[in-house]
Amino acid sequence: MKCSVLGVFLVGCTAFPAAIIAEDLVLFSDSFADVKGHIVTQTDGKIESSGAATRRVAPFMGTSQLAVGKLTIAALEDPATPGFDERPGVLALSFKTLPSAATYCGFAYLGGMAADRAMKLKELSEAPNLENLKRLKLKFRYKATNPLDAAATGASYGCRLEPLVDNSYNSRIAFDVLQATDKWQAFETTLDHGQNVENFLKTVSLAAPAGFKLVFAQTGPIANYQPGDTLLVDDIEVVRLSEQ
């Protein structure tokens, strides 16, 4: 039996289907487009807040007995400031007043207030191994501003991912320091490129945490900052990279 040229062509096409391009899977995302102006402040350990919270953001600090002056930091769910995409809605993390010394301070971001918008990352909790970290990428945009002194814009911030466990700092993945300027920048890294990965994986494996938090913190002495220094954060994402 003879086959027509067309028949052979069709068989060849069905034998070798067109490749399907896989896309990265978004595990968590937050554009801050729906924030309502909630603000939480902490002054020398005392926390106050106002407005309707849509995100879980917790300021923290360690004060020094030798400090002169008060340390006040604030996290604002800012509905007015444009983000990287020029649409309003960012997370604004600020140093309001600064003492002569401070042990540490910063902010922990846990995602949305609603349970389905928390930074659970069950894909990480269920497979705490190095190969999984290599496929999980953290992404966000960031920028520095200072409403009190425009010429002073620019500061450095520590960034880390921590499981929701006691003494979570010891189980952190620490990333490179953010050198924020008055221009929007992109942060992107797979989770295996951080420091302290071994302890992080050990804790996640043993504790099976219910979620994670992204921490932005003071790096170096408090004298490196000025009153008004603010870190704007936008478009946080955690994605699983596709298999190519």
Image (tube, rainbow, N blue to C red):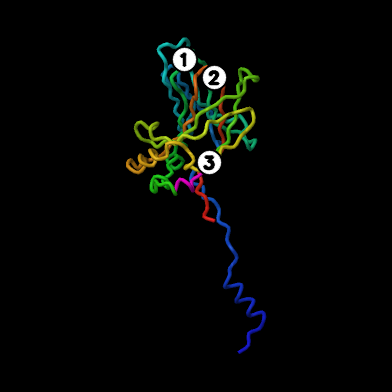
How much space separates mark 3 and mark 1, taking CA atoms?
32 Å
The part of the chain drawn in magenta is: 132-138
| Rendering coords of residue 42 (x, y %) | 45, 20
- Dots 1, 2 in contact, CB < 8 A: no
If you read the primary sequence from the N terminus, does the residue marked by circle 1 or circle 2 appear first?
A: 1
Residue in the picture at 34% in, 32% down: 166
Residue type at tag 2: Asn
Asked if disc 3 and disc 1 are in contact, CB closer than 8 Å, the reply is no
- Residue at the far left in the pictured view: 206
Q: How many marks?
A: 3
The kind of secondary structure element at disc 3 is strand
Task: Locate the C terminus by quadrant.
Answer: bottom right
Q: Residue 122: percent from the left, percent from the top?
A: 41, 46
Q: Quadrant of residue 183?
A: top right
Real-space Cα distance between discs 2 and 3?
A: 26 Å
The residue at which mark 2 appears reads as 224
Given the current orientation, which residue lies at the most extreme top position?
68
Q: Secondary structure at mark 1?
A: loop
Q: Amino acid at mark 1?
A: Ala
Question: Residue at left 60%, top 65%?
Answer: 18
Residue at x 47%, y 15% (from the top left corner): 101
Looking at the image, residue 94 lies above or below residue 211: above
**N-term-proximal mark, 3 vs 1:** 1
The residue nearer to you, when weighing 126 against 234, is 126
Q: Which residue is mark 3?
A: 189
Q: Which mark is residue 101?
A: 1
Answer whether residue 144 is visible to the viewer in this image: yes
Q: Per the image, is 136 magenta?
A: yes
Q: Does dot 2 land on a helix, a strand or a loop?
A: helix
Residue 134 is situated, as x and y percent measured from the top left of the image, at 48, 47
Residue 76 located within the stretch drawn in magenta: no
